[in-house]
Amino acid sequence: MKFSEEEYERLLVENQERIYRLALRIIGNREEALDVTQETLAAAYQQREKFRGEAKISTYLYRIGLNYAFASLKKRKRLHLPIDSIGERPGNLDSPAQALAKKERARRMELLLDGLPARQKAAVHLRIYDDLPFAEVARIMGCQPATARTLFFFGLKNLRRIIKEKDPVGVLFKQS
């Protein structure tokens, strides 16, 4: 599928925020996530002729972004998922106390998610936060759907184990 240059640029802009959120959740650093987003969009633009249209443009861009995010992690040898940076959805009517409690639970979850391997964390992010089906997660991660499911479920299993180790009596996520 061929796009005009203007159409392709519009699609890049439309997907920019999603790529940034993915990078931020995988890397955990706003500046690095911005760099990854910029590198992703620049690479996608420079290589626009290579897009064959076999997948959605968002899947194509996610895949490029995921590759850059993983490369950034390899440079640092560290993985971080800032759940509190996900952002509130419009129409959130929480009281200030409820919002503070949610932010604290998110911070605690962030610490627990640090224990997941990068590919498991990516699968969890794409499936839960972006609500993508496993077939789409697989395309983005460059694997089979069964592998994407396996990464996701092992990510959840490992997260449960981490929670049990760090919070054996269940006080970290107690509702306020």
Image (cartoon, rainbow, N blue to C red):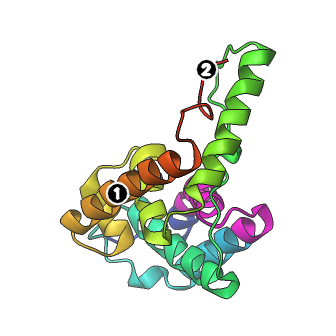
Q: Is residue 119 above or below residue 48?
A: above
Quadrant for the N terminus in the image: bottom left
Is residue 33 inside the magenta stretch? yes
Q: Nearer the viewer, mark 1 or mark 2?
A: 2
Q: Is residue 109 above or below residue 96?
A: below
Q: Position of residue 29 (x, y in %)?
A: 75, 64
Residue drawn at (64%, 50%) of the image: 110
Query: Label 2: which residue?
Result: 175
158 vs 94, nearest the viewer: 158
Is residue 91 inside the magenta stretch? no
Q: Which residues are magenta?
A: 10-34
SS assignment at label 2: loop
Q: Position of residue 149 (x, y in %)?
A: 26, 58
Q: Position of residue 108 (x, y in %)?
A: 66, 43
Query: Label 1: which residue?
Result: 152
SS assignment at label 1: helix
